[in-house]
Image: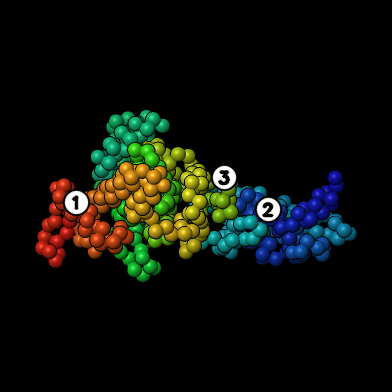
């Protein structure tokens, strides 16, 4: 096949991630070369209109050398593309080709671009930093935390981490905290890295998880700001989520009751871990988790990393890069995450058993928002468990089944209440009823049963006191 035929096939294929048409050579041509160099390389055909029609271009003896000079003088670090003229349909077009540059990012006149799909995207400051670190195979969390010393780290937290890593069996660490951190490159000499500070600091960095239970966008019925180190923050956030996600109880005739949360908890944990491990810690914003009656959202600061797109995330074969390599490794070694870049795949697998829940990932407001939405809100909860136990007993036509269904449903409700009070001591009936979305009269009956069993007590005055677990 002749070169002109190859060019014709390229034109017929249309513009893409690695191909662009330009009617003439101008500053936008240089911007596209920069965008290609900052991505995976690409080709520009000068003399071809956006619709693929060959317009041709007039070139003089020094035209191509002048173009090369302009590209070289307008880019930093300077790039020099391959440049070749061709005759197509009796007209001259010029092919400019640049390969991916090894040390990025390249800029032109102080502006940075990267090729995304079939257009050029101007990079913001955080994206410029990310691209630079990617090209050097570095990550922000591997840098030394300025003005911090090894005394800033908690030996107790490090010891727990070492024990957990050795227990999980993916790696073996020395029992000495110093040697273990050196082995994982979590310290540089006598200074901790940012990863070490995020994981083990005595006084955790102020990268919060702000989490709340909402009735409407403005009515918040419970709210918490979690400020612990990353392992602690994940567990505290999951406890809050579990205490506020509705649960129903099902009875199938077996001795064991079946418990079903409104959302699959492994999927929620995976989404939370994804936010904590992959967020942009150079961004001062908080991770935000909002729990509504019909949806749960998790917002993580920082856009998708390494050129990954929302469309690629929708597949099961996307290739991800890790923004925080040392943090990700720590969570991997403790089996909090299974495999880099597989989190969304596991979330979708968990959701197969929840057809009533829709799942969405989007980029918004400088970060990534994950949403779990109930397609139809079940009246569910504990009352559903009671009713279901009754109905199944009746359907079986056995009075004993009815009674067992009712009793088991009530007992489960009492246990849910007891667990909730252990995590939220001092609450009164109206508060408990509102949080659990269970009628006050039902709550009062359950509280009475728990008090008779000496499992809870009421402390304080009748007007201001509340219930506590014994």
Task: Determine the image quadrant of residue 437.
Answer: bottom left
Q: Residue furthest bottom?
A: 218
Label 1 or label 3, whichever lies nearer to me, is: 1
Secondary structure under the numbered disc 3 in the rendered image: loop
User: From this viewpoint, is residue 387 visible?
Assistant: yes
| Residue placed under numbered mark 1 in the picture | 449
- Label 1 sits on a secondary structure element that is helix
When asked about the image quadrant of residue 435, the answer is: bottom left
Q: Is residue 462 left or right of residue 1?
A: left
- In percent of the image, x 79 and y 55: which residue is there? 12
Whichever of callouts 1 and 2 sits on the residue coming sooner in the sequence is 2
User: Vertically, is 366 above or below 405?
Assistant: below
Report the front residue among 298 and 419. Answer: 419
Residue contact at pointers 2 and 3, CB within 8 angstroms: no
Task: Tell me if 241 is positioned left or right of 363 in this view.
Answer: left
| Cα–Cα span, label 2 and label 3 | 23 Å
Residue 306 placed where, x, y %?
A: 53, 50
In the depicted view, which residue is nearer to us: 400 or 244? 400
Up the image or down, 43 lies above or below 330; here it is below
Dot in front, 2 or 3 = 3
């Amino acid at each position: 096949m002749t070169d002109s035929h190859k060019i014709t096939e390229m034109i017929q294929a249309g513009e893409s991630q690695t191909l662009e048409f330009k009617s003439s050579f101008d500053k936008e041509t240089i911007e596209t070369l920069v965008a290609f160099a900052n991505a995976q390389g690409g080709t520009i055909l000068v003399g071809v209109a956006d619709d693929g029609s060959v317009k041709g271009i007039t070139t003089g003896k020094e035209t191509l050398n002048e173009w090369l000079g302009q590209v070289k003088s307008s880019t930093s670090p300077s790039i020099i593309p391959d440049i070749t003229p061709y005759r197509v349909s009796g007209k001259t077009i010029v092919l400019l080709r640049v390969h991916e540059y090894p040390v990025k990012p390249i800029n032109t006149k102080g502006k940075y671009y990267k090729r995304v799909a079939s257009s050029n995207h101007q990079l913001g400051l955080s994206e410029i930093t990310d691209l630079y670190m990617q090209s050097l195979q570095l990550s922000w969390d591997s840098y030394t935390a300025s003005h911090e010393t090894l005394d800033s780290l908690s030996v107790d937290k490090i010891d727990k981490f070492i024990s957990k890593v050795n227990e999980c069996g993916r790696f073996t660490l020395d029992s000495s905290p110093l040697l273990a951190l050196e082995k994982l490159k979590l310290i540089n000499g006598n200074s901790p890295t940012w990863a070490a500070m995020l994981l083990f600091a005595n006084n955790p960095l102020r990268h919060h998880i702000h989490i709340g239970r909402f009735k409407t966008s403005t009515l918040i019925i419970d709210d918490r700001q979690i400020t612990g180190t990353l392992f602690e923050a994940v567990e505290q956030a999951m406890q809050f989520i579990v205490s506020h996600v509705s649960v129903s109880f099902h009875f199938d005739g077996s001795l064991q009751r079946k418990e079903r949360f409104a959302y699959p908890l492994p999927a929620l944990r995976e989404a939370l871990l994804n936010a904590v491990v992959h967020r942009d810690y150079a961004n001062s914003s908080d991770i935000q988790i909002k729990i509504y009656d019909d949806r749960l959202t998790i917002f993580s600061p920082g856009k998708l990393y390494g050129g990954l797109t929302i469309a690629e995330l929708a597949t099961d074969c996307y290739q991800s890069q890790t923004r925080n390599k040392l943090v990700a490794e720590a969570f991997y070694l403790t089996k909090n995450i299974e495999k880099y870049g597989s989190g969304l795949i596991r979330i979708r697998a968990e959701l197969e058993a929840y057809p009533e829940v829709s799942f969405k990932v989007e980029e918004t407001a400088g970060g990534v928002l994950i949403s779990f939405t109930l397609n139809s809100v079940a009246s569910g909860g504990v009352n559903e468990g009671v009713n279901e136990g009754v109905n199944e007993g009746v359907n079986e036509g056995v009075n004993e089944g009815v009674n067992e269904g009712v009793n088991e449903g009530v007992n489960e409700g009492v246990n849910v209440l007891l667990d909730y009070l252990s995590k939220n001591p001092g609450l009164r009936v109206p508060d408990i009823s509102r949080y659990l979305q269970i009628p006050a009269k039902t709550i009062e009956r359950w509280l009475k049963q728990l008090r008779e069993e000496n499992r809870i007590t009421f402390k304080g005055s009748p007007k201001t006191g509340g219930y506590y677990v014994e």
